[in-house]
Amino acid sequence: MTFQTTIQPSGHQFPVETNETLLEAALRHGYNLPYSCRDGVCGACKGKVLQGEIDHGHGSALTEAEKTSGMALFCCAKPQSDLVIECQEVSAVKDIQVKTMPCRVHSMEKPAADVMVLKLKLPANERLQFLAGQYIDILLKDQKPRSFSLANAPHNDELLELHIRNITGGAFTQHVFNEMKERDILRFKGPLGSFFLREDSDRPIIFVASGTGFAPVKAIIEHALHIGIKRAMHFYWGARKLSDLYMLDMAQQWEAQGIKFTPVLSDALPEDEWQGRSGFVHQAVLEDYSDLSAHEAYVCGAPVVVEAAHTDFTAQRGLPNEAFFSDAFTFVPKS
């Protein structure tokens, strides 16, 4: 059975099959709703159902109170009637083609013991058009796709750069660290996601990254510097110990170009001799800013970090919900 969905305020309409989510149907018909994890964890696709009935699905990033008020996770929700939904479409990605492509492992470098920087080479005369901050899905045979953010900016697209952390129990990450070699062939689909710089805004920006959440923030900052954006930008990078800040020199060099940088360690080792900020990375933002009502926040990393930042920045510091952009990294366990 097919139901009709109308997006407000744009008035765009598209059909949705009962066995597909609202996000899947919108993307299939060329309408780009905000999304990131596509698994109901990050909350990036949250919007309101103004009319009609839905099945909420399995998503965890929605409270019962939000469901009662009409909110839904469009990456999980399926229609049970015709619908009118409310959300802001992501117009900047509508003309970018999502491709499935092969690529070759060009180089492998470990800036930290548990972080691998993969650089991937596309076929000759091929380029991937993407927005800084988007991600790709590595496609594995008979397995769930693995999502990794692109760490390079679009102007530097000869190679695609991924930052991969070695996670215990992760089938693909174990393969990367123990078996993968240069010149191996991979397949991927992309670009995906709505985590990218809103260039039409003049709001000051707070960037927050935990761990390898640094990758898409790196891409966005390099893009912003490349095109000469003059907005005030403050980057907070959180990790457990000093070696986890695996490209610290690069982040420090951005300061000379006007990007304020605050590294934060939650569990520094004695040998780190750490004299900087300590604790949770989003807490450092709360300590530094009493009012975020005029800012934008771009937050990437572990779901717990993204969720805490969203809750506290909006509830405690007045950040508008529509000025919070996120990308939550979710872990796919070995089956």
Image (cartoon, helix red, strand yellow):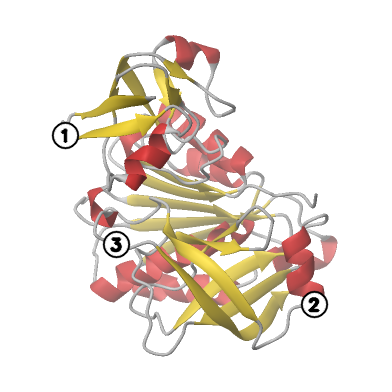
On screen, residue 307 above or below 101: above
- Which dot marks residue 119? none
Q: At which x and y percent is residue 259?
A: 39, 65
- In the rendered image, which quarter is residue 222 located in? bottom left
Amino acid type, residue under disc 1 in the picture: Ser
Q: Residue beneath label 1, please?
A: 10
Determine whether, in the image, residue 98 is placed left or right of residue 94: right
Q: Amino acid type of disc 2?
A: Glu
Residue that mark 2 sits on: 179
Note whether 230 is above or below 306 in the view shown: below
Q: Can residue 47 be spotted in the picture? A: yes
Q: Across the whole image, how many numbered discs are drawn on residues?
A: 3
Separation of marks 2 and 3 at Cα, in angstroms: 33 Å
Q: Name the foreground residue: 266 vs 42.
A: 42
Mark 3, secondary structure of its residue: loop
Residue in front for this viewpoint, 292 or 35: 35
Q: Secondary structure at mark 1?
A: loop
Q: Which residue is mark 3?
A: 96
Residue appearing at x 43%, y 56% in the figure: 192
The mark that comes first in sequence, 2 or 3, is 3
Q: Residue at x 29, y 45 (%)?
A: 29
Residue placed farthest to the front in the image? 1
CA gap, disc 1 and disc 3: 20 Å
Q: Is residue 245 visible?
A: no
Which of 240/322 is in front? 322
Label 1 crowd (10 A; few <14 / some 14-19 / many >=20):
few
